[in-house]
Amino acid sequence: MLKERRIVLGVTGGIAAYKAAELVRELVRGGAKVRVIMTDHACRFITPLTFETLSGNPVATDLFRMTGNFEIGHIALAEFAELIVIAPATANLIGKLSAGIADDLLTTVLLAATAPVLVCPAMNAKMYAHPIVRENRARLVSHGYAVLEAGYGELACRTEGQGRLPDPLEIVEEIESLLAQKDLQGEEILITAGPTQEPFDPVRYITNYSSGKMGYALAVMARRRGASVTLISGPTELTAPRGVEFIPVKTALEMRDAVLDHLEKSTVVIKAAAVADYRPAVCQATKIKKKAGPLTVRLERNPDIVSAIGKKKGRRIIVGFAMESDHLVENARAKLMKKGMDFIVANDVTEAGAGFRADTNIIRILDREGSDERFPLMDKLEVAGVILDRVKMVRSGRRIRDER
Ligand code: CTP
C-alpha cells in the first residue's frame, strides 16, 4: 500500500519524461509522499512546475542549492526515501550509476541512499540493445538494484523496438511490490481464477459471469508479499500480473490437469475459479445447425478440482470460495468440510458490491474449527490481503503445533 510511503522519483532527460508526470499522479493518488529530482536534461523536456504541481512538493534540481527554501540537500533526500524510482532512466544515468559517478543531484542522492532503487529504462532501441548499456544494466542488477525491462513498441524516434518506458501502472505495481513486507516468502501459491468455458460446438460454449478479478487480485498481492505464484486462469479480459507464472486454460478438464501438474511444488492452493460443474457430453466437431423444434444438449458432470486436491492435501493449505445466493453459511460450511479446505471465503452474490464483476467484495471466512469472521465491503485487493493474512495465520498455527 502506498499510503504515507515516502518515494523519491528521479526524472532524467528522455522524451518519456512526460510519462513520469502520470506516474507521480498515480503515486499521489495512492497516498504516497513524492519528492521529485530532475536532471538538467529532464528540465529541457518537461518543467519542474509540472512535478511541483502534481507532487505538491518542491522539485529538486541543483546539487549546489541544498539549503535554500525550495531545495533539500542530497543527504536529506536520500534519508527521506523509503524507495527511489528512476523513470525514465536514460542510458546516461544507467552508465553513470553503474560506474559510481556522482556529478549531479540525482546521482549523488543515489550513491548516498540505502533505500531500494527501481530503475525504469527508456531509450532508443539501438541504445537499449548496445552491449555496454546491457552490461551496465546487468551490473546494477548484480548490486541489488531492481531494473525493469523496457517495453516494446513504437518509439519517439519513429522506430519500433524495445526501449519504451514501461506503463506507469506497471511501474506503480513494481513500487508496491518493492515496498510490501515479504511475509509470504517461501510459499508457493497456486491460484485458480476466472470462469471455465465448456464448448458444445466450435462456436458455442457454456460459461458463467466470473470476471477473474478476485483470483488475479490474490495473485498480485501474493507476489507483492514475496510468494512465488502460479495463476491458472480461465478466459478473462484481464492481463496476466507481472512476475507470476501464468497458465491460461479454457475448460474445467484443462484446469484440473493444470492444477494437478502444478500441485507438487505448491504449499498453498487457492481456488478462486468459478468452475463449471457440467460440460456438454459431446462437443460437435462442426457447428450445430438449427432445425425445427427445440435442441437438447446433454450435460455431464465435471470433476471437482478442489476435492481432488483435498485427497492429496499433505501439508498444503487449501482455500476455497463459495458464492451463494441463499443459505450462505450452511452451504459454505458444507463445502468447507466436504472438500477438505482449511478455510472458505463465502459471499452472497445477491448483496450489492459482492457480485462477480464488481471491483469490491463482502466476504466472511469460515474455518474448520467453527469460526465465522465477517468483513465489511472492501476492494478486491484488500480482500486478497485479508485472505493471505489468514493463510499466514494457518501457517503459523501449524508451526506452533509442530514445535510442541
Ligand atoms: N470447485 C472446483 N471444481 C469444481 C467446482 C468447484 O474446484 N468442479 C471449487 C471452486 O473453485 C470453489 C469451491 O469449489 O473454490 C466451491 O465452488 P462452488 O461452485 O461454489 O461449489 P460447488 O461444489 O460446485 O457447489 P454448487 O455449485 O452446487 O453450489
Image (cartoon, rainbow, N blue to C red):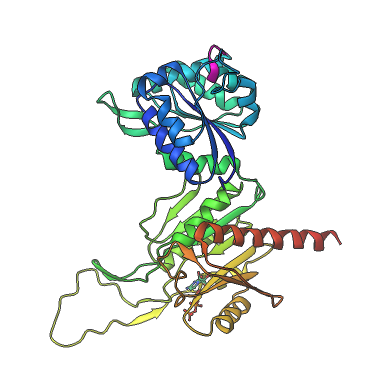
List x then y, in percent, for residue 98: 55, 18
List x then y, in percent, for residue 16: 37, 28
Do we see residue 166 in this rendering? no
Q: Nearer the viewer, residue 315 or 383?
A: 383
Q: Is residue 402 above or below residue 7?
A: below
Q: Farthest residue toward the left?
A: 292
- Quarter occupied by residue 141: top right
Q: In screen coordinates, is 107 left or right of 193?
A: right
Task: Kindly identify the residue that appears in the image at 44 percent across and 73 percent down.
Answer: 352
**Quadrant location, the C terminus:** bottom right
Q: In screen coordinates, is 367 left or right of 277?
A: right
List x then y, in percent, for residue 193: 46, 62
User: What number of labels is visible?
Assistant: 0
Q: Is residue 244 above or below residue 393?
A: above
- Quarter occupied by residue 402: bottom right
Do we see residue 329 in this rendering? yes
- Quarter occupied by residue 152: top left
Q: In screen coordinates, is 299 left or right of 119?
A: left
Q: Nearer the viewer, residue 205 or 80?
A: 80
Task: Kindly identify the residue that appears in the image at 28 percent across and 81 percent down.
Answer: 297
Q: Farthest residue toward the right?
A: 404
Q: Is residue 370 above or below residue 65?
A: below
Task: Kindly identify the residue that appears in the image at 60 percent across and 18 percent down.
Answer: 67
Q: Is residue 112 above or below residue 264?
A: above
Q: Which residues are drawn in magenta?
A: 101-106
List x then y, in percent, for residue 72: 59, 23
Task: Kindly identify the residue that appears in the image at 49 percent across and 49 percent down.
Answer: 245
Q: Farthest residue toward the front?
A: 69
Identify the main secondary structure in magenta: loop
Q: Is residue 169 magenta?
A: no
